[in-house]
Amino acid sequence: MSLGDLIPQLAGLSYTPPGTRPVGLGGQNFTHCCLLALNESLVVRSDGNLSYSTTSFVAPSFSIDALETAQFPCGATFDGDMNGAPVVRVPYDWCSTRCAGWEISNSDAAMQQWVAPLVQFIVPSLAFCTNVPRTRKLAVPAIVFKAHPRTLIGFGSYWLRLLGALLLMTLDTLGWLAICFAFAGPMMMSAVYEYALDRKVLEFLAPPNGKPPAITRRLRAQLLLAVVVGNIRMATLERNDPDAQSCNDNAIPNVFEGKRSARGRGRSRPVHNSIWKRVMVLVEDFETTRRAGRQNEQVVSLPTKLKSLLNSQASFGSTVGAPVLFFIGGFVYTVLDSDNDLGDNDTAHSLAFGLWWMVIPYLAIISCAMLASNSPSTLDGLVYDGDATAPDDEYSPGSWARRIKKAKLYPGIGFILRQIEGYNPIETAFEGRFRTVKLWKRGLNKREWVQEAISEYAMLAPQQSGSMIPSNELRRSLTLNWRDRLYVLVGALFAVLAPCLLAFLTSYNTPQAGLSCRSLTYLVYAISQVCEISLWICTARIKIKYGAHWAEARPIPKIPERVILHFCWWGQVVIGLFAIFAAVIGTTMQLLGVYRSCACKVPVRYWPRLNDPDAYIVLSDDTAEDIRAAQRWWTVTGSTAVIVIGIVCALAWWHQRRLRKVFRDEADKLNA
């Protein structure tokens, strides 16, 4: 009598996993490995009964009688028995020899392994990331929209063009999702900074428990404009002649002080910031109308224009509130339904995966809580752009553009760059004269707008009455103090790290408990985001000290700070690669099943000493330890995530509504 006669699951057992896929490409099967381990653990005695072999891999706490009556351990599922299935565990050496490679996600367990994470978390994140403001997008060639399906050839090409457009848009959305996930830290930091600055400005104009400040109507209008158009990129100067480019290369603009070099003033038009000048025409027209006593003319008033700019930002409820509600509903169902699969490690890691991806909804919530519209289209319709006669606005080149310009000086690289120059697969997200800035720059960019208003007020201070607020006190009142900065830092860190912490706890406490591949992925991602936030803070301090365009200053006054600048830039590049690896590669490996391998089933603490007796791997499913861990952590972490994101969404909505009301009231006061 053989083992196959007594245990049908072991009949005809081969030493190679089923299927033709190589184990190095996902062809391993750990249920088959469990059968191999169980086969080596049992022998048939001469009397025809089962007995453990001398090298049994079944936990000693399970007797032969218990093994025969309990649920079969290999491939077991939760059946309501809290005692679970018998434990079959093997040392790492045995697993690496007999079960090398990894197990690809298969159709039999598709729901827990990849369908649930993909449909419940990644697809909703695609919708959420479209609410995150961006400045560039993948260009779709115009040829794909020139189909004429009225002919046979046109009808055939129609579907090819449609497919091409859909593929490009899918690639664009997935790429933007990856960027949002990998660089969520600095994006969140800048968004929270802008949110805090909005509150600072509006509470300065309308103190909750105090007397409104004595300021000019012009400054009040400028500050309100800064709140709703502070995401518009500042131009360094206005091009006036062919030498404007050389002027820009040598000028040292400082938007916080309103100064430019003498050489710059001599070569270009004396306009420090053409975008600021162009937008402030709204204020100047308003003042001219009031001085001329023409307030009752049939023209659109400045308060109406300001409120139109405010209302151009889509409703918080429609853009992110309702999607968050549906997301929470789906997540609640996932948490409740997980009670039917207690002890299933795939379900545990799928839940952790969803908790981790909550970073994207948090980012969308904060992005939609800001008052400045993501699109400059409304501003384009309110401000005269000069049509074709207006000189071009000249922007300071970014870090990447400066490095490309330097690379062109090298013979080989320069030749390649010149050959592809002019081909641009990326286009701006919005048409028009005004450009928005990237989300991770919006906070500091809005600060530029506020500081421009303060600088102009300080310049005109001698012409104002003595009852007006002093310029130094004004600057202090509109600058975030240490408490505000602490709130910004804590808020950004919480929004990024809270999902990572909940995901980490879920995977860390899933047997075998400890730091392993999945929990290590969450940890690496969290550390990368903290480092990115730290570099953002470092760069922000330098920009505030030397001005927004510190990169054009030659030289930076202190050598250590020049080193810091280079360190921040290269640090963002290197740490960004780690973030991309953790976010994109980690997600891909989770969906494919690369983490289902011998090395990832052993805690990291045993990696330096894999021969340790405690470096074992549990091959059986639905064990009592698995069930206890699921009861202890699944509902707790899932419920916490749902409650926290619901509270954050509600608070963001409430505060945005409050600030919008304050803005409207202050705009109406301009006509008083």
Image: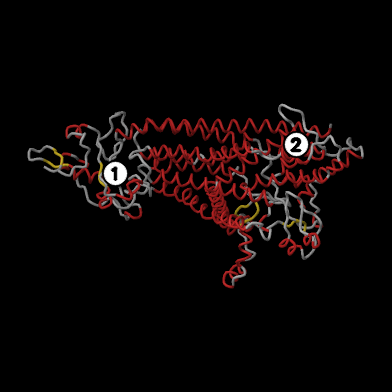
How many numbered dots are placed on residues in this image?
2
Q: Which label lies toward us, 2 or 1?
A: 1
User: At 64% from the left edge and 61% from the top edge, which residue is drawn?
Assistant: 402
Q: Is residue 500 left or right of residue 200?
A: left
Q: Badge 2, how many Cα within 10 Å: few under 14, some, many 20+? A: some
Residue placed under numbered mark 2 in the picture = 307
Locate the C terminus by quadrant: top right
Q: Quadrant of residue 108?
A: top left
Locate the N terminus by quadrant: top left
Q: Is residue 110 left or right of residue 97?
A: right
Q: Mark number for residue 617? A: 1
Q: Mark number for residue 131? A: none
Name which residue type carries label 2: Lys
Q: Nearer the viewer, residue 274 or 608?
A: 608
Q: Residue furthest top?
A: 209
Q: Secondary structure at mark 2?
A: helix
Measured as percent of width and height from the top left, residue 598 is found at 31, 48
Q: Quadrant of residue 467?
A: top right
Way the structure is coloured: secondary structure
Q: Residue furthest right?
A: 292
Q: Secondary structure at mark 1?
A: strand
**Upstream in sequence: badge 2 or badge 1:** 2
Measured as percent of width and height from the top left, residue 432 is found at 72, 51
Name which residue type carries label 1: Ile
Measured as percent of width and height from the top left, residue 149 is found at 61, 54
Q: Residue furthest bottom?
A: 411
Q: Is residue 172 left or right of residue 635?
A: right
